[in-house]
Image: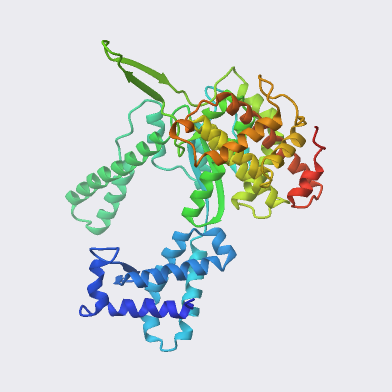
Amino acid sequence: MATYSDLLATIVSETLACRDPATQQSKGRGQSRYAPFGPHIPGENGSYRTTDAAMSAIAEVADRFRANDLMISHAHGRDAVRMEASRTLGELLPALAAEPNATLHWPMVRDRLRTRLRHIIQDVVHYLPVWLFLAQDCPAFSIGPVRFIERKDWLDAIKTRRGAESSWMAGVRDIWSGRKTDQHGICAGLKSFLKQVARTPLQPASWVQEFRTGYASGQRSENVQARTVARAAHPDQWIACAEVNGFERDESRRRGVLTIRVALDTIRLVLPGSERHLLSTAADTVVPLTIDRYNQAVGQDLAHGWRFNRPGVSGPPGMAKVIISQCQPVFDAAGECIAAAAGIGISAHACPKLADRWFNSVHWFGRACLSDGDFVAVVMMVIALDVLCGGKQDQGIIELVARLTGTAKSASVLPDGTTLETLVKKSYQLRSEVAHGSVLALHETLDVERGQLESVAAAALTEYVVALADYAKKGGADDRDMFLASLPPANL
């Protein structure tokens, strides 16, 4: 395996060789995978031409450095480390080329790269529109690091975090209320006006011109920002606010979206089965709002049918308040798992492995609820239960579900008399049929099995997270089998 010094030597030699048009490295740039212009390393005064070999060496340096540092691998995504490694090498290239002692090259790069990576870590709140409750008078509520607020309160949340009102907010409120946006960029115009007065105190005509220029420029930028924010969320949508601390921006965004999804999946657990698929984020691929169907029988005209898919959960007044109030213990326990698994607080949970298992399992459960195919949903649901039991397959799922829900293995869970044990075994077999089934098999109608398995999974996940919270508070070990043994015995 090449050492860091070997990799840096490749980067420096290949990049320096590209300065000479007569070298093979310079000539080969046109045939590289970055053709026709070839790759570059960003530098302080532009960029340095380099080769595919150098870029591969940079990627290896970055990936190895990230893998060998737990904190860096936790806080930074692969692409971010590669980019910062490229920028670091661009900054240090003249010094590396001038330093004859190759053993000093890696310490120079390592220290600068570590400093750069620490500098780009940020504390960020990510906002994502979600379909949640419709037409409900419901206060904001939180599930761990994720807070759900109504759209009308979004601007206030932004203002509070910033500490001041933003100039574009008035335009957003105008758009949301149906009024035209304010067309007066007086503030921007006055700033330009005063600057021009200071520059040319005896030329009033230039003052007027600068005011007009600033006025128009300010209006354009503020109106664009206002329209962009105003269109970001539907009037019936809520805004999920995920606070992620200590990550670079791309990794922070990835974790923010994931925590929001799992927080929504937690709410799914406590909803009736027919409403679980109605929750989604703006980042999810879901069933379109409207679906048109066109068909034609022999000798007949074109027939047109359509279906309207209304996302969001609706119900009688006070429904959302009741759900939030009654399910607060579930939300509190889930919030601890979400915070720990998302890395927002590494030590936030006393049993991080068990919390991570629930986090992964409920995420599979949520993806299953959003699937438009019964077969795929059933397979995802089985995966969720298999993850929850720690990979102990069908027998492990049966025992865990029986212990958590108090349902006997031989208890009938389907109208036709199918028992819990039979349902799980039959569903588990579908995992191996995915690779061997036909396209038609993937779309087989399994709505009854799907519905019952979904109810079983929701009950198991809900009881699991509440039991885990109690188990962790009592000082239980972070062990799959010891947690299982702490649950009531399974009925036969």
Q: With respect to residue 3, does 354 lie above or below?
A: above
Q: At x 50% / y 47%, what residue is drawn?
A: 162
Above or below residue 4? Residue 446 is above
Q: Assign the C terminus to one quadrant of the image.
A: top right
Q: Is residue 146 visible?
A: yes
Nearer to the camera, 98 or 270 = 270
Toward the viewer: 35 or 345? Answer: 35
Q: Position of residue 28 (x, y in %)?
A: 25, 72
419 vs 68, left or right, is right
Q: Residue at x 39, y 69 (%)?
A: 56
- Residue 75: quarter of image: bottom right
Q: Residue at x 32, y 20 (%)?
A: 294
Could you tell whether 99 is left or right of 474 in the image? left
Q: Is residue 411 left or right of residue 148?
A: right
Rendering coords of residue 189 (x, y %): 28, 45
Looking at the image, residue 341 lies above or below residue 172: below
Q: How is the image coloured?
A: rainbow
* Position in image of residue 350 (x %, y %): 73, 51
**Foreground pick, 197 / 120:** 120
What is the x, y in percent for residue 113? 48, 70
Camera-nearest residue between 145 and 101: 101
Q: Is residue 43 visible?
A: no
Residue at image coords 18%, 53%: 203
